[in-house]
Amino acid sequence: LLLGDNVYIDRPERPSLQRYCYYRRQSRPEFRALTPETSIAAVWDDHDFGDNDSEGGPEPFEPGWKVDALEVFRENWNNPTYGEGAGQPGVWHKVSIADVDIFMLDGRYYRTSEDAESPSMLGPAQKEWLFEGLRSSTATFKLIASGVPFPDGAKPGAWPWRSDTWEGYPDEREEIFSFIEEERIDGVVLLAGDRHRADVWRIEREEGYDLHEFQNGRLTNVHTHESVEGRARHYPLYSYNERPHFGRLRFDTTGADPSITYDIINIRGETVHSTTLYRSRLTHP
């Protein structure tokens, strides 16, 4: 699962440069060895969608540069679906593996500014798709995968009232979390990228079970983001940033209390940390 910033382009108005960056990626023997043997599902974040902290706005086909960026993205990633089709484009989609449903979110194509009257990261069509998918899912675990982190404090904003993460969209984030509680949807775990480190977060909830986020975003990047402190009821339980790394998810859905384990594995192949969550902790009372 690649959750964005998969290549660093930052030139959304130049499709030829976007293709060149992907060609450079494809020329790497390591990537050429990986792709024939591993199923890959991908969404974008700011650097492979637009430029830093970018938003596409609420219209499906405006501005024109995001339509071109989507075309290039589709040329390079073999996702099962793309948004709601031609009339409602985007890169969001669902992946189902055994008894696990993974909802891959597009947090850029329809994103509006945090300063908008009713700021949105997903847009109404994608949000309804997410809600209907969660409501109808019978999977033991439902993963919501976002290009940017959900917890407060994961990425301090340039100003106290702004943040490129879900902290800058608190009303829409609460709408999602409240939906999970109102519909009594069990087994939800959050995934996120963006930060150049690996984190485990807990988001305490008063009405439902605490939500946990597994964050990972430094597969090949030499640049490092420092660990941060949480805010209010959002707590980082673990953080690692010493070397490039990736995250591995392991599921046991056959036991009396099914589990999901998040392993952080560094570039040396060392498992530096593991966190296991049990389904009983992800269940409404």
Image (cartoon, rainbow, N blue to C red):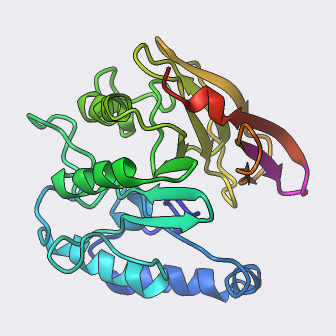
Q: Is residue 99 magenta?
A: no
Q: Choose between 53 and 116: the one closer to the eye.
A: 116
Residue at 70%, 54% (x, y): give it. Answer: 222
Q: Is residue 265 magenta?
A: yes
**Mark count:** 0
Q: Choose between 257 and 80: the one closer to the eye.
A: 257
Tell me which corner region of the image, top left, top right, bottom left or bottom right, holds residue 181. top left
Residue at 66%, 42% (x, y): give it. Answer: 197
Q: Choose between 79 and 73: the one closer to the eye.
A: 79
Which residue is outermost to the front? 256
Tell me which corner region of the image, top left, top right, bottom left or bottom right, holds residue 91. bottom left
In which quadrant will I find the N terminus?
bottom right
Classified by dominant secondary structure, the portion drawn in magenta counts as strand
Bounds of the magenta span? 261-270
- Judge from the rendering whether residue 30 lies leftward or rightward of residue 102; answer left or right: right
Q: Position of residue 28 (x, y in %)?
A: 70, 83
**Residue 165 can be seen, yes or no:** yes
Residue at 63%, 64% (x, y): give it. Answer: 98
Q: Position of residue 119 (x, y in %)?
A: 18, 38
Residue at 48%, 32% (x, y): give it. Answer: 155
**Residue 226 can be seen, yes or no:** no
Q: Position of residue 205 (x, y in %)?
A: 45, 18
Q: Position of residue 64 (x, y in %)?
A: 15, 75
- Judge from the rendering whether residue 213 lies leftward or rightward of residue 120; answer left or right: right
